[in-house]
Structure formats: C-alpha cells, structure tokens
Image: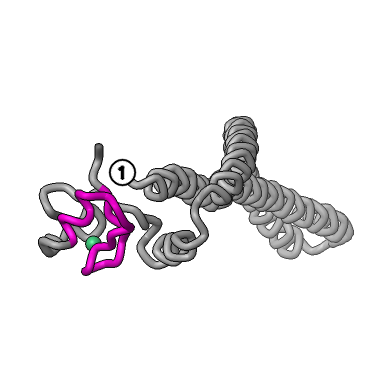
Amino acid sequence: MLDEVRALLILQDRDRRLMALAKDLEKLPVDEARAKSKLAGDEAAVAKAHDALLAAELKVKKIELDTETRRTTIKRLKVQQFETRKNDEYQAFNHEIARYDKEIDGFETLELEAMEAVDRCREALNAAKAAFAHTQKLISEDLASIAQRQQRMQAEHTEVAAERATLATRVPGTVFPLYERLMRTKAGLAVAPMAEGRCGGCHMKVIASTAINAQAALQITQCENCGRILYVTD
Ligand SMILES: [Zn+2]
C-alpha cells in the first residue's frame, strides 16, 4: 500500500469518528426536548386537575349561596306571615314557605353530591401531582445523563480533532486537497478498498487498468466512476 494512502486511511478513520460524534451531538437537543415535553404533559395534567377542583369547589359555594338565599326568604316570609291577620294569606305564606323548604332539601342533596365531587377532584389532583413529581425525577436523571453524554462526546471530539490536525500535516500536500474534496462530496468516504475488481465506495466494477494500478500501488489510483482513491489490502 502506498504510504500516502496509509496516511489517508488513518486520517479518514479520525474524520469518520468526528462525523459520527458530530451527528450524535446533534441528536442530543432532540432527546432533551423529548424529555422536557413529557414533563410539560404532566404539568398540563396538574393544571387541568387544579382547574377541575376549583370548578367543583365553586359549585358547592353556589349551592350554599342558593340555600342561604332561600333561608333569608323564608325568614322574611315568616315575619310577613306573623304580621298578617287574614287566614287565607296566612295559609298562602305557609304554602310558599313549604315550597322554599323543599327547595332547600333538594339543595342539600345536591351539596352532598357536589362535596363528593370535590373530594374526587382533590384525589385526582394529588394523583396528578404525584405523577408529575415522579416524571420530574426521571426527567432530571435523563437530563443529567444527556449532559454527561454531551460532555464525554465533546471531550472526545476535541481530542480526535487535535489528533486529526497532526495527522493531516503528515499527508503529502499533493493528495490532501483531493482527499478533502472527496470527503466532502462522497458521503465521508474518500478512500475505498477495491475487492474483486469492484470499488468499495460505489460498488461498480472498475476497468482493468484501474484494477492493475490499484493492485500495483505505485501511484494514487482513483475509481473512474466515483473518483474515490482505491487501495488493496496488503
Ligand atoms: Zn467508485
């Protein structure tokens, strides 16, 4: 194998590692957002349960208020009844008071039901809060592990990039621009192995003279189809 090709293969190995690291690093914000969106869902559930509890409590208050209004009315009617001297008016007041009393009875049943609903809402709110706390704990663990992964990958990236810079200086200047251009345009694979007369990059069969040149390894040989630098494993 040509010394230049050997140097390029090592360089390509580091470049591919750097590309893989960059790709993994790009995915981290997506993982982070996914974790946070799960928390937002639980947070919304708590807010919804809280609103439901407030509404249920408001319903109880309204029934209490309605009952109180009827009680005040009954008091007023009783005063008026006390003041009347006409028997038919007296009976009419009795009738009206009985009607309001019946309404109050109905409200008491409604209030009991409404209070039970408040209890159920309170339980639901507590459950939602517990689920939120549980998720929050899991998410904070997830976020910590994502941050650790990021740190580790960034450290490795810095290390490999430094190594790559040193390796790049060892590649002969004539072949380096070709390598760089191929890395950019050929999906991160500039130097490909040739096996059974086929280019390991584009998988096309190369012409006989190319195969012979790659085998001889006396000069840089490129696949005539994709342009990649070919080598044969020793
Ligand atoms: Zn090719």
Q: Nearer the viewer, residue 216 or 163?
A: 216
**Amino acid type, label 1:** Met
Q: Look at 79% across and 64% down and name the residue there.
A: 86
User: Residue 122: in sight, yes or no?
Assistant: no
**Rendering coords of residue 8 (x, y %):** 42, 49
On the rendered image, what quadrant is the C terminus found in? top left
On the rendered image, what quadrant is the N terminus found in? top left
**How packed is label 1: few (under 14 Cα within 10 Å), some, or many (20 or more)?**
some
Q: Quadrant of residue 117?
A: top right
Query: Is 93 on the left or on the right of 165, as rendered?
Result: right
Q: Look at 47% across and 62% down and name the residue there.
A: 174
**Rendering coords of residue 130 (x, y %):** 61, 31
Residue placed under numbered mark 1 in the picture: 1
Q: Look at 27% across and 54% down and name the residue there.
A: 230
Color scheme of the displayed model: one colour
The kind of secondary structure element at disc 1 is: loop
Q: Count of labels shown?
A: 1
Ligand 1 in which quarter: bottom left
**Rendering coords of residue 102 (x, y %):** 62, 50
Residue 6's place in the image compared with 79, above or below, is above
Magenta segment range?
210-231
Q: Is residue 216 magenta?
A: yes
Query: Is 219 on the left or on the right of 93, as rendered?
Result: left
Residue 167's place in the image compared with 70, above or below, is above
